Image: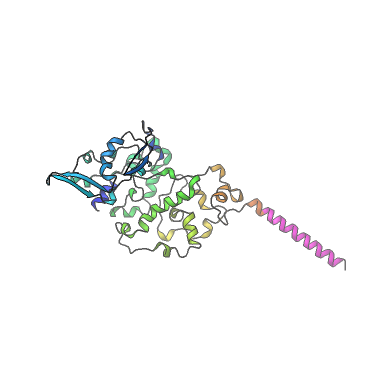
């Protein structure tokens, strides 16, 4: 594992809750703009302390005094360890200090080389067993993840942070009002590795995979990619957690059309689960599928089926009666 990567993922702490931002004193508002970043309207209680880090890690280049040379030196920051202020202060962890996740020793510059190997937190280290987060079922997520095909890559360096960047991850993007944005956001998490072979090589020795060619069998491929998330077909559905973390082997991925295009579409337990359960009605009265994304075959209704059969029966009866009287009147 490379130094930039270790530094990048070592900020592990809390990744999966939108309630984190409600830290005491974290709602102060500011409007601050300079040449390095856009207007920020959130004031963290650790803002000034974090600026020690953002002074270098919040921009493309940094400057320091080289005591050996006796002069100021400018250097380029590695792209992997540049943290966007705006994204951080709009993400779930915006109310935390950098040293909540990183060693206090990072406040010293130059950083000690041994810090590169500091122990990384795991999600469950912070979220597990805490009543405040019980509704998010992190223990279930952890259990699912350990059954996932991703878990098999842990020895190669796979962690939660390969998918959920602790510096800019926002779970609150997932809601029914911005479904298209949520689909794009979630799919980009997958494509970060699965469409970037340089990233993929860090975890696997497999040959590069062309996503489009691999999904050639999928009808209306472009429409599917725009309107559903990868996990709809590649993860085991679990309605008790926000997003399934049991990524299935590729041979077990959904390929049958009727699993989505049916009266009991699996999308109701995954993509559309953020809607009120009161709106989850089978068939034509299913306002979610009709209003958000029309899915052919998922809008059937048993009452309309019965009505249709009655209409057909009446039409056949009328035609039959007409034929009968025509024949008997001759």
Q: In which quadrant of the rendered image does the C terminus lie? A: bottom right
View extreme (right): residue: 330
* Coloring scheme used: rainbow
Q: Does residue 210 lie above or below 122 as drawn? A: below
Which residue is at a point 78% across and 63% down the rendered structure image?
A: 320
* Residue 321 highlighted magenta (yes or no): yes
View extreme (front): residue: 35
Q: In terms of depth relative to the viewer, which is nearer, 329 or 102?
A: 102
Please state the total of marks drawn on the protein image.
Answer: 0
View extreme (bottom): residue: 330
Q: In terms of depth relative to the viewer, which is nearer, 128 or 83?
A: 83
* Residue 120 highlighted magenta (yes or no): no
Which residue is at a point 41% across and 55% down the rendered structure image?
A: 248
Q: Main secondary structure of the magenta part?
A: helix
Location of residue 326 in the rendering, given as x and y in whole percent from the top left corner: 84, 66
Which residue is at a point 33% across and 39% down the rendered structure image?
A: 126
Q: In terms of depth relative to the viewer, which is nearer, 8 or 275?
A: 8
Q: Which residues are magenta?
A: 306-330
Which residue is at a point 26% across and 41% down the rendered structure image?
A: 53
Q: Quadrant of residue 88?
A: top left
Location of residue 171 in the rendering, given as x and y in whole percent from the top left corner: 41, 44
Residue 320 in the figure: left or right of residue 81: right
Residue 182 in the figure: left or right of residue 156: right
Q: Quadrant of residue 33?
A: top left
Residue 226 in the figure: left or right of residue 164: right
Location of residue 155 in the rendering, given as x and y in whole percent from the top left corner: 28, 53
Q: Is residue 9 visible?
A: yes
Q: In terms of depth relative to the viewer, which is nearer, 40 or 115?
A: 40
Q: Is residue 270 visible?
A: no
Location of residue 324 in the rendering, given as x and y in whole percent from the top left corner: 82, 64
């Amino acid at each position: 594992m490379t130094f930039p990567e270790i530094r990048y993922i070592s900020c592990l702490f809390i990744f999966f809750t939108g309630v984190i931002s409600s830290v005491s004193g974290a709602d102060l508002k500011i409007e601050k703009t300079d040449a390095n970043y856009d207007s920020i309207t959130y004031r963290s209680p650790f803002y000034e302390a974090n600026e020690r880090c953002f002074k270098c890690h919040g921009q493309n280049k940094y400057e320091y005094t080289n005591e050996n040379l006796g002069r100021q030196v400018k250097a380029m920051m590695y792209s992997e360890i540049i943290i966007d202020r705006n994204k951080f202060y709009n993400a779930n962890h915006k109310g935390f200090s950098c040293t909540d996740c990183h060693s206090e020793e990072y406040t010293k510059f130059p950083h000690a080389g041994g810090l590169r190997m500091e122990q990384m937190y795991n999600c469950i280290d912070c979220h597990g067993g805490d009543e405040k987060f019980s509704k998010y079922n992190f223990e279930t997520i952890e259990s699912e993840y350990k059954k996932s095909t991703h878990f098999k890559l842990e020895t190669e360096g796979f962690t939660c942070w390969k998918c959920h960047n602790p510096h800019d991850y926002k779970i609150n993007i997932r809601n029914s009002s911005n479904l298209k944005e949520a689909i794009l956001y979630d799919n980009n998490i997958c494509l970060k590795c699965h469409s970037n072979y340089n990233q993929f090589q860090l975890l696997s020795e497999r040959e590069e995979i062309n996503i489009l060619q691999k999904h050639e069998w999928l009808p209306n491929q472009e429409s599917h990619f725009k309107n559903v998330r990868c996990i709809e077909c590649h993860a085991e559905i679990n309605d008790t957690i926000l997003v399934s973390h049991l990524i299935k082997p590729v041979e077990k991925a959904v390929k049958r059309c009727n699993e989505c295009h049916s009266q009991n579409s699996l999308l109701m337990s995954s993509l559309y689960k953020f809607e009120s359960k009161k709106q989850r009605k089978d068939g034509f009265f299913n306002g979610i599928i009709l209003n958000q994304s029309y899915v052919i075959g998922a809008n059937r209704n048993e009452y309309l089926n019965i009505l249709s059969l009655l209409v057909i029966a009446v039409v056949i009866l009328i035609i039959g009666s007409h034929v009968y009287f025509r024949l008997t009147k001759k």
